[in-house]
Amino acid sequence: MKVMQALKSFTLLRVLTVVTVVLIWKVTASVVIEYRNYWPPNFESDFLRGREAYFWGPYRWVFYVHLISGPPTLILGTILVSERFRRWAPAWHRRLGRVQGILILLFVAPSGLWMAYYAATGAIAAAGLGSLAIATAVCVALGWRSAVKRQFVSHRLWMWRTFLLLCSAVVIRMIGGLATVTHFDALWLYPVSTWVSWITPLVVYETMRILKLPVGRVSAWG
Ligand code: HEM
């Protein structure tokens, strides 16, 4: 009976994990499809509306760096947290991990920090996205350091945090999508989302960890 129950919850966990990964890939693909509005810049598009005044300065270069480096980190994240992949191809885990570290530390986080200053809706959103940039850079740096020191328990912890922080890009778009379909257009939604989108996944993760629930230990995927 106990074996059956364990098998059932393992299967449920496995299905949930696969659904989450597919969702991340799907949202990433839909973000990239929107790039048709950015090359060349369409100032009538949702994101670029009202940004023409500063777009042609350094913002443009930082924006394109962010657009090129962001999606690969999300896809790499789903691969790198997979236990199965690491066991199957440890050398590739290390190689892709280095690429991920470089992409985040040199491109995604600095460009995110720069762009945060110009965030739509103002200071609260700017602070939310700026803090996200700093938190992501710190987590990946600590994760990298613990890998070099061969402290793999701590490595896994920091890298899960990094991945969840990257997933805020998915969460914030899901919040926006939900608001659109429910015709909810409160002005406070975006600034609040810039905080909720990364703090919530982190709090859920830390709570599950404290309660010793099987987060990040699903051998079916991660
Ligand atoms: C450290 C993590 C990240 C930070 C701090 C960050 C920060 C930002 C900021 C500040 C903006 C401009 C928001 C505004 O002006 O209101 C932005 C836009 C954008 N970010 Fe990120 N970002 C991060 C991760 C990612 C990831 C993983 C992706 C991959 C999908 C991504 C894709 C984009 C895109 C495509 C835009 C342009 C707007 C849009 O089309 O939605 N970002 N990001």
Image (tube, rainbow, N blue to C red):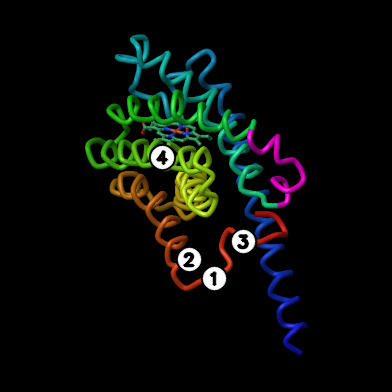
Q: Residues within 10 Å of mark 2 (few under 14, many from 20)?
A: some
Q: Which of marks 2 and 3 is nearer the N terminus?
A: 2
* SS class, disc 4: helix
Distance between the alpha carbons at the discs numbered 4 and 2: 19 Å
Residue 139, x across and y down, in percent: 42, 43
Distance between the alpha carbons at the discs numbered 1 and 4: 24 Å
Residue 126, x across and y down, in percent: 28, 36
Q: Quadrant of ligand 1?
A: top left
Q: Is residue 86 above or below residue 215?
A: above
Give the main secondary structure, helix, strand or loop, of the magenta stretch. helix
Along the line of sight, which residue is nearer the eye, 148 or 163?
148
Q: How crowded is mark 1: few (under 14 residues within 10 Å), some or many (20 or more)?
A: few
Q: Is residue 101 above or below residue 12?
A: above
Numbered circle sitting on residue 136: 4
Amino acid tagged 4: Thr
Q: Nearer the viewer, mark 4 or mark 3?
A: 3
Q: Name the residue under label 3.
A: 217
Q: Quadrant of the C terminus?
A: bottom right
Amino acid tagged 3: Arg
Q: Which residue is drawn at 41% across and 24% down?
A: 48
Residue 198 magenta-highlighted: no
Q: What is the span of residues highlighted in magenta in the rendered image?
A: 84-94
Q: Residues within 10 Å of mark 4 (few under 14, many from 20)?
A: many
Based on the displayed image, in which of its 4 quarters is residue 124 positioned? top left
Based on the displayed image, in which of its 4 quarters is residue 35 positioned? top right
Amino acid tagged 2: Arg
* Labelled pair 1, 2 in contact (Cβ < 8 Å): yes
Numbered circle sitting on residue 209: 2
Q: Which of marks 4 and 3 is nearer the N terminus?
A: 4
* Labelled pair 3, 1 in contact (Cβ < 8 Å): no
Q: Name the residue under label 1.
A: 213
